């Protein structure tokens, strides 16, 4: 299977569009250093897939954040990405995890989708988490925000070192309403036959051929997906300036150095007394 690719496709005779995303390395890098419980790891994988699909679906240039937040064991889970499919993500827990559904993990909460385009105004959509699965929550989002019939299928493998996260997306095109409904029902029935094992282990062309061999989907060139944290020593220095020199020197006197760890990749940046003074000089 080709790793970490987003595939878009259209049907020449049907008013429906689709996407298929298969992610391995990006997902593994995202969770490698975090000791997430299996249900949280799976949730973050689904959220990663959802963000990739949303980035391609909403057609914008800029950054996107898809966050789940609530009063459950998982305080929040978020994926940050951009239109180039550079992704990073994290989850934070506030109590022991019991259960595996979105409701069991997040509790009473919301999905917040924030889009910050390179040009134009920032947009934020908020959807209550009223369903057990993330796919159903996203389907409700599209139903409310765009009034477009949408279906999603997710599959994850959380075995350490073999992590994979995959997803399939279908959405009607706003052309001929009745024809779109009929076309969507036809493709939805075919797509519902997909098995998790097929999504996770077959290459994209094989998956699409198995599902739609009579409907001849026109598949566009795939877009690569990558893990990109974005942290750096220079950015950390900028953050330290806002803290203030004396506070930092007091920390050095107490602990020997100032140590800042990136929340996403857990890389640590360390600064001694001389380095702190040179920042402010």
Image (cartoon, rainbow, N blue to C red):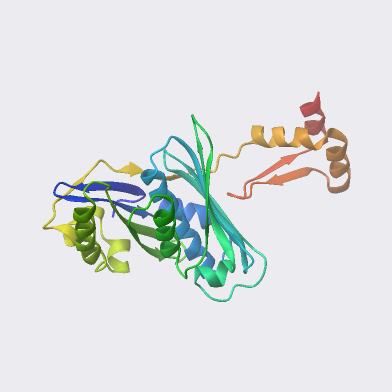
Q: Nearer the viewer, residue 125 or 190?
A: 125
Query: In the picture provided, is 194 more to the left or to the right than 104?
Result: left
Q: How many marks?
A: 0
- Asked if residue 231 shows in the view, the reply is yes
Q: Is 227 or 192 nearer to us in this picture? A: 192
- Residue 243 falls left or right of residue 147: right
Residue at image coords 54%, 38%: 122
Residue 227, given in percent of the width and then of the height, sits at 47, 46
In the displayed structure, does residue 160 sit left or right of residue 166?
right
For the question of whether residue 162 can be seen, the reply is: no
Residue 149 location in percent, x, y?
32, 57
103 left or right of 16 in image: right
Report the residue at 13% width, 51% height from top: 216
The percent position of residue 238, horizontal first and vertical second, equals 70, 32
Toward the viewer: 278 or 107?
A: 107
Task: Specify the quadrant that holds the C terminus.
Answer: top right
Q: Position of residue 187 (x, y in %)?
A: 21, 60
271 vs 42: above or below: above
At 51% from the left and 53% from the top, the residue drawn is 30
């Amino acid at each position: 299977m080709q790793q970490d690719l987003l595939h878009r496709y259209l049907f020449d005779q049907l008013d429906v569009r689709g996407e298929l995303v298969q992610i391995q390395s990006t997902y593994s890098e995202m969770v490698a250093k975090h000791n997430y419980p299996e249900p949280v790891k799976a949730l973050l994988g689904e959220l990663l897939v959802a963000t990739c699909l949303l980035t391609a679906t909403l057609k914008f240039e800029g950054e996107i954040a898809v966050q789940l937040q609530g009063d459950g064991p998982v305080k929040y889970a978020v994926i940050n990405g951009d239109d180039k499919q550079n992704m990073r993500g994290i989850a934070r827990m506030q109590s022991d995890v019991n259960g595996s559904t979105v409701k069991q993990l997040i509790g009473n909460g919301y999905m917040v989708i924030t889009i910050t385009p390179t040009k134009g105004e920032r947009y934020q959509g908020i959807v209550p988490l009223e369903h057990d699965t993330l796919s159903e929550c996203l389907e409700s989002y599209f139903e409310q925000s765009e009034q477009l019939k949408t279906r999603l299928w997710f599959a994850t493998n959380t075995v350490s070192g073999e992590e994979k996260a995959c997803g399939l997306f279908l959405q009607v095109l706003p052309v001929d309403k009745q024809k779109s409904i009929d076309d969507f029902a036809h493709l939805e029935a075919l797509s519902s036959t997909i098995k998790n094992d097929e999504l996770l282990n077959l290459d994209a062309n094989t998956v699409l051929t198995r599902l739609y061999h009579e409907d001849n989907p026109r598949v566009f060139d795939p877009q690569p997906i990558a893990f990109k944290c974005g942290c750096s020593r220079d950015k950390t220095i900028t953050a330290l300036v806002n803290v203030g020199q004396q506070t930092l020197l007091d920390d050095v006197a107490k602990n020997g150095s100032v140590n800042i760890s990136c929340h996403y990749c857990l890389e640590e940046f360390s600064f001694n007394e001389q380095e702190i003074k040179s920042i402010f000089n």
